[in-house]
Amino acid sequence: MKSTTIRKVEARDRRFPLHDGAGTDAVHVVTEYAFAETRLLTGEEEQGRGIVLTLGRGNDLVCRAIEMLAEPLAGREIEELMADFGSVSRQLADHAELRWLGPHKGVIHLALASVTNACFDLWAKARGVPLWGLLLALPASAVVNLLDLSYLEDALTPTEALQILEEEESERGSREEILVKGYPGYDTSVGWFQYEDAMVRENARLAIEQGFRAFKLKVGSKDAARDLRRAAMLRELAGPDCRIMFDANQQWTLPQAKSFCEAIGGLDPYWIEEPTHPDDVEAHAALARHIAPMRIALGEHVPNRVMFKNFLSRGAVHFVQADCTRLAGISEFLTVSMLARKYGLPLVPHVGDMGQIHQHLVLFNHIALGIEALFLEYIPHMREHFVYPAVVEAGVYRTPQTPGCTADLKE
């Protein structure tokens, strides 16, 4: 196997304006997506690329943190680096000075995500395979070595993680048909917060024509009647055979969340997403009890594996929305996937990468971990900026074949 060594690390501040209210929710009203991009330069053709999502201002802070965090990677050979990446990730996350700015959350954690994703991308490119193929080809012990399982000893030990992988090996063959069929998607773009009702109606019509059978609407308006009207409208448009989800983006207090959920129970929502403050485990647990059998989805703003452990152990979440551009990259995403698998919950990623990396990760989760192939969020607004945009046809993600993580941005 050819040796590939990281010679230099660069960070780039990439910003892309959106239009006409795209990307907006009840809290985040800006119409700009930005990526803090890590570039691992080798002096050869293979170059690692990693991204994390921000909404513009502050993206430069993540880029500066990338440069500081990634200093120890210069001179490292990629196969050697990834052989025990769980330890590498913990060392980077526990930088004696930078850790103080987190720990394990915020700007520093986003920077670690970008760096980590670039490492996985370079590794897959050096081997000449797509990320999903790389991960599926690894022995179970090598997968466990990618994970930082510290602080999870009460929920998931290395021995348990290894056991999960080994127990699922005999069933892999029966699940590999997903590589041919493709992975189902759901459309988030039909109902951004600032879209007028007419646009929501037209977007839903087009999405149904394109083969989607699940849609999400942004709620959390100060005018509750607006939310209820639009929710009923989407259910009518989607009909009884499609799934609809409502996303409050942390806008509500617990009493407000209870009130809304009571009001829309008759619309049969598949989930309520981010109903209240993302750190409030107890409020989510209380809401879950109050609205059962209605279910809660969250994870977009759950910053690390320890917080996910707490949500899972308290029964405060039903759909785990881990995101490798919000957690500490692919490694911590896989750790949270293991936790979801142990607790028997579906993992439906939030796609801060616009699905570019997660289209690989959900294939691994389904085939190697036995996690249900439910669906993957689809947000099309950034397609033109990627060298290898995800291919979604008839509402289904087609299996990528390009080596790496397919997160390379155009110059």
Image (cartoon, rainbow, N blue to C red):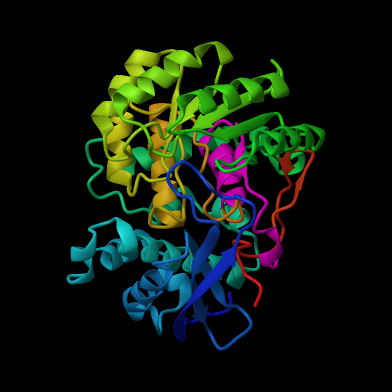
Please tell me whether residue 364 belongs to the stretch shown in magenta: yes
Q: Position of residue 184 (x, y in %)?
A: 68, 36
Residue 363 drawn above or below residue 269: below
- Apparent side of residue 357 relative to residue 288 in the rendered image (left or right): right
- Apparent side of residue 130 relative to residue 29 in the rendered image (left or right): right
Is residue 84 among the parts visible in the rendering?
A: no
* Residue at (59, 27) in percent of width and height: 230
The front one of 91 and 381 is: 381
Q: Quadrant of the N terminus?
A: bottom right
Q: Position of residue 298 (x, y in %)?
A: 42, 36
Range drawn in magenta: 358-387
Q: Quadrant of residue 156?
A: top left
* Residue at (50, 43) in percent of width and height: 25
Q: Position of residue 169 (x, y in %)?
A: 54, 38
Residue 305 drawn above or below residue 254: below
Is residue 90 among the parts visible in the rendering?
A: yes
Residue 321 drawn above or below residue 403: above
**Looking at this rendering, what residue extends furthest in the right direction?**
209
Q: Position of residue 92 (x, y in %)?
A: 29, 68
Residue 200 drawn above or below residue 388: above
**Looking at this rendering, what residue extends furthest in the bottom direction?**
43
Q: Quadrant of residue 308?
A: top left
